């Protein structure tokens, strides 16, 4: 699976949009981009995933560049409860064939 | 959404004893479950992939005789840390994937984790 590069930490003001970047320059055509987050001492929580089209759900939006070498997770209106470590992961396929290999992630601190 | 539980949520044991951690998918059937370990201030490390009715597949460097995994049903996988030592103290997290064709097939659902402390 392709490796990902994320900034180690970011700050965001409460109520503003949080834009978390991820580089995955070696991604293959059949690899999906997944985003998870982990709030302290809890299990990871699924946020969103995509292949090549931009995706949006009730939690966030995922913008994938046309060459698929990078993506951005957007939390439109960050709250204090969004403070967490955010992991960008690429993996082959879905279902039970796709292992998730976690990198170091980005620690997002939402400030009042 | 799909829910995965773990039991116990935390456990303290003496060095040399064995500890069993349960991972259950509560409202869906899981053909595959994964086990992760996380040390303080570090990322999750995949330990093994557990498939119902077959032997687990361990990641490189993970001792299969020390970390016994059993996936006897579509809703339960267990991880047993045998002869635990202080260096095994960690946060153990499981995840589950639904059966093919189900709404939960393309997503891994994570449990809340189990904090193991070995004295």
Image (cartoon, helix red, strand yellow):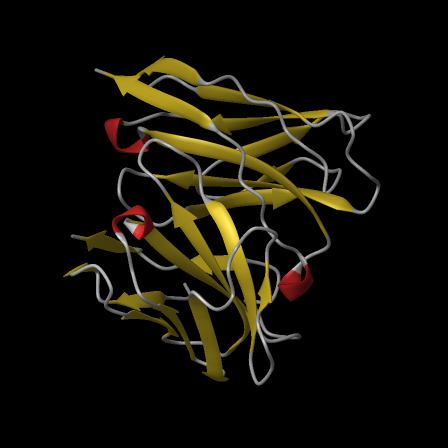
- Residues B44 and A64: in front is B44
The residue under the point 64% across, 29% down is A4
Describe residue B67's horizontal placement relative to residue A112 as left or right: right
Q: Is residue B113 above or below residue A74?
A: below
Query: Can you tell which quarter of the image residue A83 is in?
Result: top left
Q: Is residue A97 above or below residue A7?
A: below
Residue A43 seen anywhere in this rendered image of the structure: yes
Q: Residue A27: horizontal and vertical position, in percent?
A: 77, 34
Q: Is residue B77 left or right of residue B48?
A: left
The image quadrant that residue A51 belongs to is top right
For the view shown, which residue lies furthest in the front direction?
A: B16
Q: How many marks?
A: 0
Task: Mark yes or no: residue A14 visible.
Answer: no
Residue A23 against residue A42 in the figure, above or below: above
Q: Quadrant of the N terminus of chain A?
A: top right
Q: Can you tell which quarter of the image residue A56 is in? A: top right
Image quarter of the C terminus of chain A: top left
**Horizontal and vertical percent for residue B64?**
51, 66
Q: Is residue B70 left or right of residue A63?
A: left
* Closer-to-camera residue (A1/A21): A1
Residue at 64% across / 63% down in the picture? A95
Q: Residue, x 24% and y 53% (percent of image)?
A: B115
At 44% from the left and 71% from the top, the residue drawn is B68
**Along the viewing direction, whichever of A88 and B38 lies nearer the viewer:** B38
User: In the image, residue B32 lies at what x, y percent?
Assistant: 56, 71
Question: Picture coordinates of residue A34 (x, y %)?
Answer: 59, 42
């Amino acid at each position: 699976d392709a490796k990902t590069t994320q900034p180690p930490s970011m700050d965001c003001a409460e109520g503003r949009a949080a834009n978390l970047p991820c580089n995955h320059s070696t991604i293959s055509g059949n690899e999906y981009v997944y985003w998870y987050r982990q709030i302290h001492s809890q299990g990871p929580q699924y946020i969103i995933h995509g292949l090549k089209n931009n995706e949006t759900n009730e939690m966030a939006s995922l913008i994938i560049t046309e060459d698929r070498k990078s993506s951005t997770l957007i939390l439109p209106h960050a709250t204090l409860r969004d403070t967490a470590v955010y992991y960008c992961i690429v993996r082959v396929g879905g279902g039970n064939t796709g292992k998730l290999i976690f990198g170091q992630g980005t620690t997002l601190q939402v400030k009042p | 959404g799909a829910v995965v539980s773990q039991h116990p949520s935390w456990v303290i044991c003496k060095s040399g004893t064995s500890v069993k951690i349960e991972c259950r998918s509560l409202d869906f059937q899981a053909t595959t479950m994964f086990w992760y370990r996380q040390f303080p201030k570090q990322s999750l490390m995949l330990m093994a992939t557990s498939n119902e009715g077959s032997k687990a597949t361990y990641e490189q460097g993970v001792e299969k005789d020390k970390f016994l995994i059993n996936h006897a049903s579509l809703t339960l996988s267990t991880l047993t840390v045998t002869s635990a030592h202080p260096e095994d103290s960690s946060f153990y997290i499981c995840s589950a994937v639904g059966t093919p064709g189900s709404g939960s097939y393309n997503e891994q659902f994570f449990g809340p984790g189990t904090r193991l402390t070995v004295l």
